[in-house]
Amino acid sequence: MTATTWRPLAACLLCGAIAGWATQGWRKDASIAALQRAAATSQSTAATVLAQATARVLTLERAAGAALAQRADKLTQEQTHAKTERDRFSLDVRSGAVRLSIPVAGGQCAATADSATAAGHRDQTRAELDPATAAALDAIADDGDDATRQLNACIDAYNTVRNTYHVQTE
């Protein structure tokens, strides 16, 4: 091959390579642009889904918060009512309007009540408690009642949260 045939052929090959390279670049740029559009669409969709999920969770949180606040108010009302009743009972015990007694048998406190006596025979021997002892026993019972009210409120709060968020507990 002579230089005169070689040069046009080389020029053709060089022009073809340049054209191919440019075409490949355009195709690559088009592919990148398509990928960027798809990524932007996916990102927009994901952001929308995230915003909707966040709104649902915030709504659930507000509902659960309101339900828990209502339960706390109910507990406060129950405790206030119980304290009023407790104070009234204590005053009645101290004033003598209410007298507390326990059954006794043979001079000793009966640890267990006879079923016939418990069924309605009221002619058993009873020992009256002095007001201080009655008040102490009442305070013990009141503490237990308060604890029961608080535990019931705790169980209610747990169930409210579990039901609000549809939590599987098993």
Image (cartoon, grey):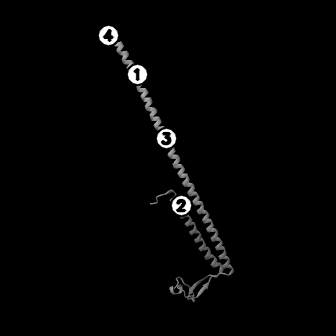
Q: Which residue is mark 1?
A: 19
At label 2, the amino acid type is Thr
Vertical arrangement, residue 51 with respect to residue 10, above or below: below
Do the numbered discs 2 and 1 sit on residues whose CB atoms are within 8 Å? no
Q: CA distance from mark 3 to mark 4?
A: 60 Å
Q: Are marks 3 and 1 in contact (CB under 8 Å)?
A: no
Give the labeled residue for mark 4: 2
* Residue 164 percent coordinates (x, y): 52, 58
Check disc 1 and report its element: helix, strand or loop: helix
Q: Nearer the viewer, residue 111 or 53?
A: 53
Q: CA distance from mark 3 to mark 1?
A: 36 Å
Sequence-wise, the earlier of marks 2 and 4 is 4
Residue at image position (62%, 76%) is: 136
Among the two numbered marks 3 and 4 on one chain, the one whose residue lies closer to the N terminus: 4
Image quadrant for the C terminus?
bottom left
How crowded pointer 4 is (Cα within 10 Å; few <14, some 14-19, many 20+) is rated as few
- Name of the residue lying farthest toward the left: 1
Q: Judging from the image, what secondary structure is the residue with disc 3 in?
A: helix
- Name which residue type carries label 4: Thr
| Marks 3, 4: nearer the viewer | 3
Give the residue at mark 2: 160
